[in-house]
Image: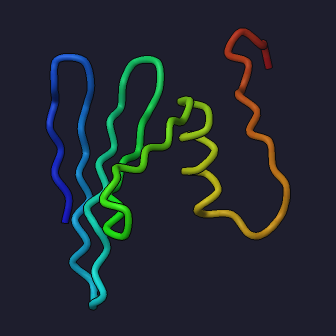
């Protein structure tokens, strides 16, 4: 299950683990104009763990989920190029 909320300066997506036990803590994704943060509470240390990703890293992660093992570089199409 997940929720999506639009805040003043970001879009907040919360991922709730509903799978088989043991369940993981909720993951909160904050999409800002300059970066994306991924947060999850670590129950062992009782501390919030945070990763900060650029939008390019998020794009690469999304692409990587559907690709086989290997090394890749995404290249954007040049829209000004005449074919």
Q: Is residue 69 left or right of residue 34?
A: right
- Using the rendered view, name the quadrant where residue 1 is placed: bottom left
> Image point 26% across, 61% down: which residue?
26
Please, which residue is most extreme toward the top here?
80
Please, which residue is most extreme toward the right here?
71
Count all numbered tags in the image, as a single digit. Answer: 0
| Along the line of sight, the residue nearer the viewer: 40 or 43 | 43
| Along the line of sight, the residue nearer the viewer: 38 or 66 | 38
> Image point 64% across, 56% down: which residue?
64
The spot of residue 78 in percent (x, y) is 73, 18
Please, which residue is most extreme toward the front here?
45
Q: Is residue 36 left or right of residue 80?
A: left
The spot of residue 22 in percent (x, y) is 30, 87
* Quadrant that contains the C terminus: top right
28 versus 5 height, above or below: below
77 versus 63 height, above or below: above
9 versus 62 height, above or below: above
| Along the line of sight, the residue nearer the viewer: 60 or 26 | 26
Q: How is the image coloured?
A: rainbow
- Using the rendered view, name the quadrant where residue 12 is placed: top left
The spot of residue 23 in percent (x, y) is 28, 80
The spot of residue 67 in percent (x, y) is 69, 63
| Along the line of sight, the residue nearer the viewer: 44 or 8 | 44
> Image point 25% across, 45% down: which residue?
13
20 versus 17 height, above or below: below
> Image point 74% across, 39% down: which residue?
74
């Amino acid at each position: 299950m997940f929720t999506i909320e639009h805040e003043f300066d970001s879009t907040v997506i919360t991922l709730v683990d509903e799978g088989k036990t043991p369940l993981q803590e909720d993951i909160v994704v904050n999409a800002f104009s300059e970066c994306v943060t991924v947060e999850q509470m670590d129950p062992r240390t009782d501390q919030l763990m945070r990763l900060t990703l650029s939008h390019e890293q998020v794009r690469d992660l999304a692409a990587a989920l559907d690709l086989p093992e290997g090394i890749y570089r995404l290249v954007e199409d040049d829209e000004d190029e005449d074919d």
